[in-house]
Image: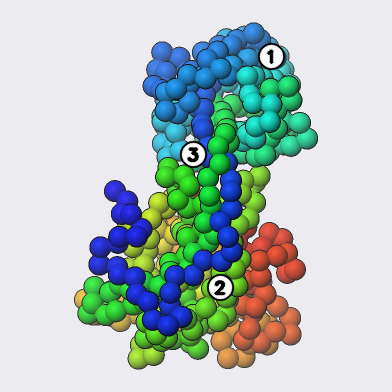
Amino acid sequence: MFIFRRALPGLPMFAAGSLLLQVWGASEAVAAERRFLIDFGAGTASTPGWNNIHFGHTGSELSGLVDSTGVTSGLSLQITDGFWQGWTGAYNGEGTTASSLYPATATQDSFFIGTNQGLTDELARLRISGLAINGTYSLRFYASRMTADQTSDRTALYTVGTQTVELQARNNIDGYAQLSGLAPSNGALDITLTMKPGAVFGYLGVLELIEQDSVVELTPRTLTPRMTTVPKIYNGPMGYYESLPRGYDADPNRQWPLLIFLHGNGERGNGTTELPKVLETGLPEKINAGHQLEFTVNGVSDSFVVLIPQTGTGSSGWHPYQVERLLDIGLASYRIDPKRVYVTGLSLGGFGTTAFVEFSLANAQRIAAIAPSDGAHYGHDVWTPDLGSVLTNTCYIAQAGVKVWLFYGETDGGWGWTASQFVDRLNACSPAPVPAPVVTVYPGVGHAAWYRAYMTDHTWHTPNLYEWLLAQRRP
């Protein structure tokens, strides 16, 4: 159960001087959404409440599509060029039943194109008609084909007009592709499914049509001070900023990625009147300057819920229990996709970022990716009030499949060695991390790599750090 964010039990919002709720700019008028869900390949186990199409041949049609609330519309779907020679053999029932995006009855089956029984079908075409001529629409595509074959390419290309997105269906669980900002021609959208060059099959299991048919107000990204305690460290207080993305309240069903940022040594404070110090550099500085942290990845506009804690001046640094506490708050109190949780930090925060996932395999298994800058954990253990001294293990990161992008300056004589040694430890793990960690070393830069690492444009990196994070997901 999610707790409404303005009434978080035990997490009071406080205000002192400059610590009032901050919202930048005026609200933006955007279109609300009406969704239509279509299950391709549905057989006897049709997905309840969905639009189910059973046959993939040319001429198959669904009329009077119902939306996600069960209301019938004037929309229709036609298959204008059938799947796999237009045969009913276009059905494939070997998709996943483990997706968190859609019901198993929808994800376990699909229609396909490609070479089968000596025949090749190069493409399939669909048309959705009855759309508002002046409307704006998005299309989300999903497909899955579970197989022991780890080498064959099963990437489908979905094209509408001049826009194309792709999706690898091989062993896909939660990946999807989306086209946005589509304007219908004469009240219709024509969709073409082809295979990426070199692919052997292309699939379509779920099509989600998103219709923007009314106007709502989107509040810009927020920055709100809050306070909690860390039970495992003597219930010590910890202040933090909550920053919610633009449009967080517009869609109550949407889940967001969670990004936790850990500051450096110079931004320590008491968590209340000194909390604004965390906004002086790195990622929080971007938010404080009004950046919405919105990025387009694989054709989808996305952003983060961001939590920015402050550690005290009397501590030795970031403790894994502090990060654990904030992660628990994030997952319990906000609409978070648990497979898209990230931790990043600079200098002292880089130490804390890596220490958290080195502390236990359970910690590492909660995180999709980390991005430490200007330093990494360099001790062999972490002291805890309840367990005493706990030995850390860098190989938890490889075992859990946590993705890593690390930044440091080539001339950082103070702490650069901690970053390089961390990479050496990680690469020495057996099995080795897959993929290998991304390591960016800036020539001629000292203890200030974070200035480049947290840039929101492509001055130093394409994709930039935020785009890279948004593309990472736990299996």
Residue 48 image point, x, y percent = 39, 21
Count of numbered circles on the image: 3
Q: Earlier in the sequence, mark 3 or mark 1?
A: 1
Residue count near mark 1 (Cα–Cα under 10 Å), binned few <14, some 14–19, many ≥20: many
Q: Residue at x 34, y 75 (%)?
A: 14
Name which residue type carries label 1: Thr
Q: How far across and how far down the image is residue 223, in percent?
A: 48, 68
How packed mark 3 is, by other alpha carbons closer than 10 Å (few <14, some 14-19, many 20 or more), is many
Against 351, residue 7 (above or below) is above
Q: Amino acid at mark 2?
A: Asn
- According to the picture, the residue beneath numbered tag 2 turns out to be 288
- Earlier residue among tags 2 and 3: 3
Q: Is residue 196 left or right of residue 97?
A: right
The amino acid at mark 3 is: Ile
The residue lying toward the viewer, choosing from 224 and 107, is 224
Q: Which mark is residue 173?
A: 3
**Residue at 63% from the left image edge and 55% from the top image edge:** 295
- The answer to which of 190 and 112 lies nearer the viewer is 190
